[in-house]
C-alpha cells in the first residue's frame, strides 16, 4: 500500500486485478501443460488477487464515506 491512505483502496483494486489475471494465466498454462501443481498455484494466486481487490473496494467505500 502507498503512503497516501486516500489512494490505498484504488491501489489495492488495481494490484488485486493484476494478480487475478496473472493467476488465471498461470492456471491456464498449467491446464495446457497438464501441470496440476501450476494450476493450483494459479488458482491460489487468482484468489489472493480477488481478496486484495475486494479489500480495495471496501477501502474505497470507506474513503468515499469519510468525504
Image: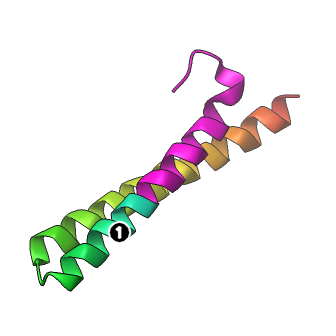
Above or below, 33 relative to 11:
below
* Residue sticking out furthest to the top: 3
Image position, residue 24 (x, y; %) = 38, 69
Indicate whether residue 38 is drawn in magenta. Answer: no
In this picture, residue 17 sits left or right of residue 25: right
Label 1 crowd bin: few (<14), some (14–19), many (20+), radius 10 Å:
some
- Mark 1 secondary-structure assignment: helix
- Judging depth in this view, the residue of 12 and 22 nearest the camera is 22
Residues drawn in magenta? 1-20
Image position, residue 19 (x, y; %) = 42, 53
Please indicate, yes or no, whether residue 43 appears anywhere in the rendered image.
Answer: no
Q: Residue at x 65, y 17 (%)?
A: 4
Image position, residue 5 (x, y; %) = 65, 21
Figure coloring: rainbow
Q: Residue at x 60, y 36 (%)?
A: 11
Quadrant showing the C terminus: top right
Q: Main secondary structure of the magenta part?
A: helix
Residue ID for mark 1: 25
Q: Residue at x 21, y 84 (%)?
A: 32
In this picture, residue 40 sits left or right of residue 47: left
Q: Residue at x 55, y 22 (%)?
A: 2
Image position, residue 60 (x, y; %) = 71, 40
Amino acid at each position: 500500500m502507498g503512503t497516501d491512505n486516500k489512494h490505498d483502496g484504488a491501489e489495492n483494486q488495481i494490484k488485486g486485478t493484476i494478480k487475478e489475471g496473472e493467476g488465471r494465466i498461470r492456471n491456464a498454462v498449467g491446464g495446457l501443460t497438464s501441470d496440476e501443481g501450476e494450476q493450483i498455484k494459479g488458482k491460489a494466486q487468482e484468489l489472493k488477487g480477488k481478496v486484495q481487490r475486494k479489500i480495495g473496494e471496501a477501502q474505497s467505500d470507506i474513503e468515499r464515506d469519510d468525504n
